[in-house]
Amino acid sequence: MDNKMLSEALISMLGAGNVRISEPMKPHTTFRIGGAADYYVTPQTEKQIADVITFLKKSDISYIVIGNGSNILVSDEGFRGVVVELGDAFSGYEILPGIQADSDEVLVKANAGMKLTRLGNQLAANGIAGFEFATGIPGCIGGAVRMNAGAYGGEFKDILVSAKVIDDEGVIRELSADELELGYRTSIVAKSNMIVLEATLKLRKGEPDIIRNNISELAAKRRQKQPLEYPSAGSTFKRPEGYFAAKLLRMQVLRVVQEVAHRFLKSMPALLSIKAMRQLKMYVSLQIILRVLLWRSSVSNLNWRL
Ligand SMILES: Cc1cc2nc3c(=O)[nH]c(=O)nc-3n(C[C@H](O)[C@H](O)[C@H](O)COP(=O)(O)OP(=O)(O)OC[C@H]3O[C@@H](n4cnc5c(N)ncnc54)[C@H](O)[C@@H]3O)c2cc1C
């Protein structure tokens, strides 16, 4: 299909105001980098999403669905195809009574483009607890379900009841939490390239002030540990089971430094000259620095050979 036909087809489905051509991706990603996408479209209704995805699949045109762009890295070459943004047009939510009567349970149905921070703050104001862990994650519901987003001991898996998706055959379905196959930063949505339209979350009644306080505490922890002032897509490494990637990296750096120190010591002559004494002093200083690093990196429980 040539560019003219593709533009016309997209405009007829979505309206001219929702189709941008050669759109730079930089402002649509938290990395703040990325060349232009051939087409950047913003459907406004569920039907428009379904229509545009069916059309793109049938025409064999590459596409990617994005939310807040906080977990994507776009090449300087841009994207040859259509970027479909499920953003502000899909940022509604609804509070429903819980499944169990007479309990503190509350169900919240949120659209794919709802920002987690916005939802978390609104839930807090409504006295709904259990979403605090996600409130500082700068993504939308759709992206968060896809990767089972999590932080500070909580993850979407803990609160998801079900999600409405467009499956890989273009059919709209409601998948239960089990069917979503939520794992560490993955789900069936990622594995089968589905599109999340809506998620139903199981939360509970709480005290607005306590919830707000929990959110502030987690935000403070985040600010303390993460360089939020720089563009990024959050964590670069997946966490190996039982470890944190940062801890492993620090251990690796320390191992290299330790090896250098050993080689240095071995190369010293048996009889200590003044020069050797100076070298020994340097070695001892290095040991002290390493001990401080070990202590700071909380790996001091390991058996270091120094
Ligand atoms: C400073 C910072 C801190 C972060 N902290 C955390 C954290 O603590 N925990 C954590 O889990 N993540 C964290 N992230 C990563 C990111 O915010 C999450 O992965 C978030 O869930 C991504 O949502 P998004 O809307 O921005 O997705 P996008 O970046 O827009 O898209 C990410 C992926 O999801 C897909 N996708 C987006 N929307 C949909 C949809 N509706 N249906 C199907 N697929 C979709 C996209 O195709 C893409 O593959 C952080 C990122 C930053 C920049």
Image (cartoon, rainbow, N blue to C red):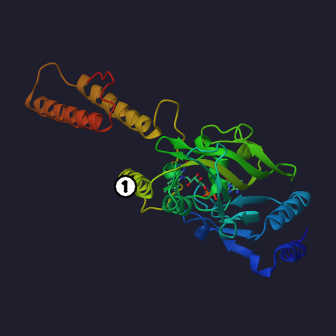
* Residue 208 pos. (x, y %): 45, 58
* Residue 4 pos. (x, y %): 88, 77
The image shows residue 225, relative to residue 48, as above or below, that is above
* Residue 83 pos. (x, y %): 73, 64
Q: Exactly how many numbered labels are in the figure? A: 1
* Residue 109 pos. (x, y %): 67, 56
The answer to which of 169 and 172 lies nearer the viewer is 172
Question: Furthest-front residue in view?
Answer: 102
Residue that label 1 marks: 220
Q: The N terminus is located in which quarter?
A: bottom right
Looking at the image, residue 171 sits to the left or right of residue 230; the answer is: right
Q: The C terminus is located in which quarter?
A: top left
Q: Residue drawn 65% across and 62% down? A: 93
Q: Residue drawn 43% across and 55% down? A: 215
Q: Residue drawn 43% across and 40% down? A: 246
The image shows residue 163, relative to residue 20, as above or below, that is above
User: Quick check: which quadrant has ligand 1?
Assistant: bottom right
The answer to which of 84 and 149 lies nearer the viewer is 149
Question: Furthest-bottom residue in view?
Answer: 16
Looking at the image, residue 285 sits to the left or right of residue 180; the answer is: left
How packed mark 1 is, by other alpha carbons closer than 10 Å (few <14, some 14-19, many 20 or more), is few
- Identify the image quadrant of residue 212: bottom left
The answer to which of 14 and 135 lies nearer the viewer is 135
The image shows residue 289, relative to residue 29, as above or below, that is above
Callout 1: SS: helix
Q: Residue drawn 86% across and 73% down? A: 13
Question: Furthest-top residue in view?
Answer: 270
The image shows residue 90, relative to residue 162, as above or below, that is below
Amino acid, disc 1: Ala
The answer to which of 98 and 295 lies nearer the viewer is 98
- Identify the image quadrant of residue 75: bottom right
Q: Is mark 1 within 8 Å of ligand 1?
A: no
